[in-house]
Image (tube, grey):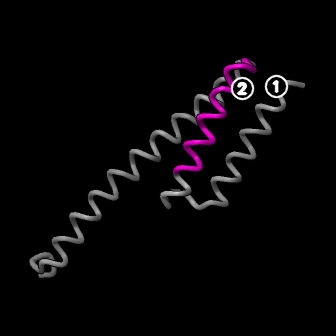
Amino acid sequence: MADRHPSAIKRNRQNAKRRDRNREIVSRMRSQVRKVREAVASSDTDKAQAELKVAIKELDKAATKGVLHRNSASRRIGRLSRAVAGLSK
């Protein structure tokens, strides 16, 4: 049985820690993206721009931590930025 080995026990502990950390980062990121989308949907330019700043920070953090691929984070930032910029027109 593999889980009796000290290295496997340690690996399980590490995986649990990482899973919790990643879930926290993903949850914060998704919540922030949702806030930006809600602000865009309600046509609130000032709130959308403020929320976008925070969302960009969360997406960059997720990419830095390896939770999200950097190109995926960049794509999401670009799409959100385009949506917010569309409000000003």
Q: Could you tell me which residue is drawn at 63 percent across and 42 percent down?
A: 56
Mark 2 burial class by Cα count in 10 Å: few <14, some 14-19, many 20+: many
Residue drawn where x is 14% and y is 75% of the image:
3
**Relative to residue 74, is residue 62 drawn left or right?**
left
Front-most of 4 and 61?
61
Residue behind mark 2: 40
**Within the image, what quadrant is residue 68 found in?**
bottom right
Do residues under tags 1 and 2 come within 8 Å of each other at their CB atoms?
Answer: yes
- Which range is magenta? 44-61
Q: Helix or strand or loop: what does disc 2 sit on?
A: helix
Kindly identify the amino acid type of the residue bearing the numbered disc 1: Leu
Indicate the position of residue 47 as horizontal and vertical percent values. 67, 20
As shown in the figure, which amino acid type bears the numbered disc 2? Val
Relative horizontal placement of residue 67, taking residue 89 as reference (left or right): left
Quadrant showing the C terminus: top right
Taking the view exactly as shown, the residue that stands out farthest to the left is 4
